[in-house]
Every structure is written in C-alpha cells, then in structure tokens.
C-alpha cells in the first residue's frame, strides 16, 4: 500500500513484492511514477542511481473501504503530491498519512506535481475529520494524534 510514489517510499518496492509475493497498490494519478525518475524525484537527488521499479499491480481510483486478507480500512485521497493517499484503520484508531501530515509539520510540495494548497485542504478536510484521538503514523518521524496536530501544527494553525 503506497501512500505516494516518491523515490524514498518506493526504493525497496520490487524487493518487498518479490520476498512476500504481494502486489503493490498505488493511486492512478501516480501510476507512471515508479518507473519515471523525474516524477518520483530520484533524478533530482544525487544519492545514487535513479529509482526505477515496476508499476503497481493494483491501481486505486477512488476513496472507499478496502479489504485485503484480514485487514479492513478506508482509503482517503490526500493529495499534495497528485496521488497522495492515507489509510485509516478505524478499529485500530490509526491513520497512515504518508507524507501528508507529520508531527508538527506537513509534507513537501516542491517535487513534481506538488500543490501546497491542495495538501492543506486534504489535511483539513480529510484527516482533521477523523476522530481526534486517531494516532497518525506518517511517512517520516514520530507518531502524533489528530488532536495534537489540530492544536499545535504551525502549518495548519
């Protein structure tokens, strides 16, 4: 389950799929990004070779509930990058927000297709509509809660 297709989130994707024989899921707006270093951002960071991985096997086109094995969760579209997704597990009280919402910060929008206004709207309309005690596990950094970010996040106050 990919929250988005920036290079730092897809670099090990092929190895993970092969080891566990599982498909990758990605939003349709970023379907081409895994094999495009300009779009996934790896062409702009001189940390090694460009990131090139196989396309996702499963393409997500809309919000809604998904069941994979024994897991049931809701997919929320949270664009900042065009195909940003968050995964809300109501029973566990946790949302995996990718690079949308961080502890005390928000995701970057300076990479290909990024839109700061859209990211802020995604957070305020989708993530801040979740229960305040929802734990936020982001793509980087410490966990937080919806309530804490509503009250203290300087990008959203």
Image (tube, rainbow, N blue to C red):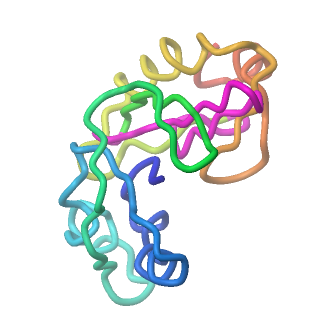
Residue depicted at x 65% and y 32%: 89
Can you give x and y, in whole percent of width and height, for residue 24 in the image?
A: 39, 61
Image side of residue 34 versus residue 70, left or right: left
Image side of residue 54 versus residue 3, left or right: left
Image side of residue 91 versus residue 13, left or right: right
Q: Nearer the viewer, residue 155 or 76?
A: 76
Residue depicted at x 54% and y 76%: 20
Residue with the most extreme bottom position: 49
Does the magenta run of residues contain 1?
no
Q: Magenta residues, as a range?
A: 81-104
Image side of residue 126 versus residue 6, left or right: right
User: Based on the displayed image, in which of its 4 quarters is residue 45 positioned?
Assistant: bottom left
State whether residue 16 is above or below residue 96: below
Can you give x and y, in whole percent of width and height, for residue 39 in the image?
A: 23, 60
Does the magenta run of residues contain 100?
yes
State whether residue 137 is above or below residue 121: below
Residue depicted at x 44% and y 22%: 122
User: Based on the displayed image, in which of its 4 quarters is residue 52 positioned?
Assistant: bottom left
Can you give x and y, in whole percent of width and height, for residue 41 in the image?
A: 32, 64
Can you give x and y, in whole percent of width and height, for residue 84 in the image?
A: 39, 39
Q: Quadrant of the C terminus?
A: top right
């Amino acid at each position: 389950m990919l929250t988005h297709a920036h290079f730092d989130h897809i670099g090990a994707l092929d190895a993970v799929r092969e080891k566990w024989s599982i498909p990758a899921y990605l939003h349709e707006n970023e379907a081409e990004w895994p094999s495009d270093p300009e779009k996934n951002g790896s062409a702009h960071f001189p940390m090694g070779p460009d990131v090139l991985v196989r396309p996702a096997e499963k393409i997500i086109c809309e919000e809604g509930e998904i069941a994979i094995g024994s897991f049931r969760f809701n997919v929320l579209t949270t664009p900042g990058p065009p195909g940003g997704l968050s995964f809300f597990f109501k029973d566990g009280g946790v949302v995996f927000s990718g690079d949308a919402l961080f502890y005390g910060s928000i995701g970057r929008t300076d990479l290909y297709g990024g839109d700061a206004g859209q990211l802020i709207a995604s957070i305020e309309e989708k993530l801040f509509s979740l229960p305040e005690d929802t734990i936020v596990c982001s793509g980087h950094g410490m966990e937080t809660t919806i309530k804490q970010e509503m009250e203290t996040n300087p990008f959203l106050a």
